[in-house]
Image (tube, rainbow, N blue to C red):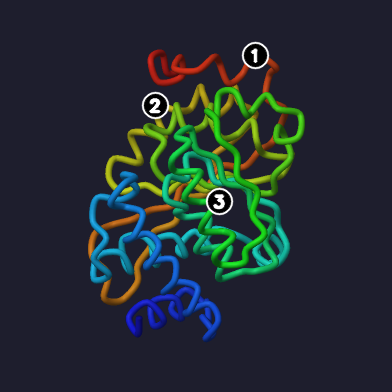
Amino acid sequence: MEKLIAGASELGIELGPKQVDSIRLYHRELVRWNGRVNLVSVTDWEVVWEKHFLDSLTVSLALPDDMLDRGRFIDVGTGAGFPGLPLKIAYPGLKATLIDSTAKKTAFLDHLAKTLGLCVAIRTGRAETLAHDSELRGSFDFVLARALGGMAVLAELTLPFCRPGGLVIAQKAHGLDDELKNAETAVSLMGGRVQDVIGVSVTQTTGTRRLAVLEKTGPTPDGYPRRPGIPRKRPL
């Protein structure tokens, strides 16, 4: 836990006792549920603190203070709650919505939110469908995406959720430059532009992580995202 606290501090995040307790409880429930629901590949704390909890908190590097204090966000394809739930724990004033297409995973998230006493909206469904829901479309200050595939697919599945002036934060490892080049058409068509690419460097961590930041500059055409499965089969 000391390594996580130190890493978070490098990001400008001070984890208090209540937040540390929440993360411990989060990990305990993750281990307990992972035996019957495939949430993460490895649950050992020596891996999880860096690869999931600290990695989730790095998205804060791409967000302005006003969004971090009281912004409304959606985590698309959240899985076991990363990166959305650790960010909510670190910034309690955030209004969080988590979506995933797998009902067993959203059942875990619902249980976890209740166990941690977090006010979080959880929806089961595919982004291609939920992005056409009037309560969700064009409603969020920022959108998080960690494992949605290439940037062309990611842009189609995330930018429709953004309000004008909102941001998409995509966590990426290798090959981002090529992905962004191949995604130029998709980003533009979804009403967005590439605002920034931020390198992530935290002491005692391994691997390479970059944050691709997209800004919503105009409306997304009504027909997007296309029906379930098509964005991945036929990227724009």
Q: Position of residue 178 (x, y in %)?
A: 33, 34
Q: Would you name the residue on which mark 2 appears?
A: 182
Indicate which disc residue 7 carries.
none
Q: Residues within 10 Å of mark 3 (few under 14, many from 20)?
A: some
Quadrant position of residue 37: top left
Q: Would you name the residue on which mark 3 appears?
A: 110
Residue at horizontal 47%, vertical 79%?
20
Q: Residues within 10 Å of mark 1 (few under 14, many from 20)?
A: few
**Lower position in the chain sequence, tag 2 or tag 3:** 3
Q: Is residue 169 above or below residue 13?
A: above
Which is in the foreground here, disc 2 or disc 3? 3
- Asked whether the beta carbons under mark 2 and mark 3 sit within 8 Å of each other, the answer is no
Q: Position of residue 6 (x, y in %)?
A: 39, 83
Q: How far apart are labels 2 and 1 at the CA level?
A: 21 Å
Q: Secondary structure at mark 3?
A: helix
Instruction: Give the residue type at disc 3.
Output: Asp
Instruction: Please indicate whether residue 115 sits to the left or right of residue 221 in the image.
Output: left
Q: Is residue 196 above or below residue 181?
A: below
Q: Secondary structure at mark 2?
A: helix
